[in-house]
Amino acid sequence: MSVASSAHHHTVLATDGTPGDRHVGTEQDMTETELPTNWGRWGDDDQLGTLHLIDAAARKRAAAEVRDAHHVSLARRVHPVPLTTGLGPVGSPAVMPAGVLQIVNFNGVKPLAMTDTLVVNTHNAAVTHVDAVAHMPVDGHIYPGVPVHAAVTPTGVTHGSADPFGAGVVTRGVLLDLAPGGGRLPADRRVAGADLDAALERADTVLSSGDAVAVRGGWDTNRPLSQPVPGLDLSAVQWLNEHGVSVYLGDIGDARPAQFPMPMHQVALARLGLPLVDAAELDELAEVCGRLGRSSFMLVLAPPRITGTTGLIVNPIAIF
């Protein structure tokens, strides 16, 4: 899956890496041989991706959403596992380390203070996290066409890291509930652009360029990788692109079993530079939206300012 740099964000690329004709597609004509890209749209050294779409107007729209004095966390609650038991020893059914491992540090018989050390497996489905564009390479390159060896080193990420998120992300968010009423999508469901259109119509609001979307499928994807889960298809990614979505938050993302290219991680993240907040918890958000009779809110992302990472744990906050 080779991808070449594009001079315009509407250029599409075939999966063999050759530039296609200029094309602005819809979910009807989007195919697996045409992939949208933002490579080159904001320069060859860009690290912000679709965060560029969050301008002053987007932040003002966000501020206008704050009027009901409510806020909701969109993060999973994580229960750390003791480091000595959470590494999946030989014979364990675990397929990967726990999301967060903990060591409680005791400082003497009568400690002056209690401290602990946390080891975070950032991209674990047990942990709500935001993916940096360096997280997913495409044919040896990361967004927007930088070779992996020039971007990711043994001592940290030098291009496409999660550093920009540390400055904070504030924009308007819109809930797109694909399983309203507390429902859950079927495990084999592939969400198309038409499904997002229907959810936006139910939300009874408009989506403007620079807004974020929170897509609820009613799923907890922290389950064995062998178990199927629903996810978005390529036409849904094209929908996100055409609507100028700046940040995607979801309790679903890429489906399992995986389809390639993976729509969310290998196209939305790697080609469009669209930040993904994986493993979000959206049930309470849906409940509050229903109670307040609205589907839009101010979204605040404020992860820790830890530099040079492929992603960061995050606690997204929706403010009404």
Image (tube, helix red, strand yellow):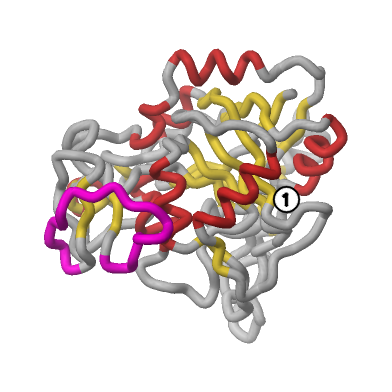
Among the 4 quarters of the image, the one containing residue 133? top left
Identify the element where label 1 is drawn: loop
Q: Position of residue 168 (x, y in %)?
A: 51, 24
In the displayed structure, would residue 160 be above or below residue 90?
above
Residue under the point 58% across and 56% down = 195
Q: Position of residue 80 (x, y in %)?
A: 72, 53
- Give whichever of 80, 218 is nearer the camera: 218
Q: Amino acid at mark 1?
A: Val
Residue under the point 69% across and 39% down = 203
Q: Is residue 4 left or right of residue 143?
A: left
In the displayed structure, would residue 295 be above or below residue 215?
above
- Give whichever of 49, 106 is nearer the camera: 49
Q: Which residues are magenta?
A: 16-33
Q: Position of residue 198 (x, y in %)?
A: 62, 51
How many numbered markers are drawn? 1
- Give whichever of 106, 309 is nearer the camera: 309
Q: Identify the image quadrant of the C terminus.
A: top right
Identify the residue position indicated by label 1 in the image.
Answer: 78
In the displayed structure, would residue 191 be above or below residue 144?
below
> Is residue 255 magenta-colored?
no
Residue under the point 45% across and 42% down = 275
- The answer to whether one can see residue 118 in this image is no
Q: Main secondary structure of the magenta part?
A: loop
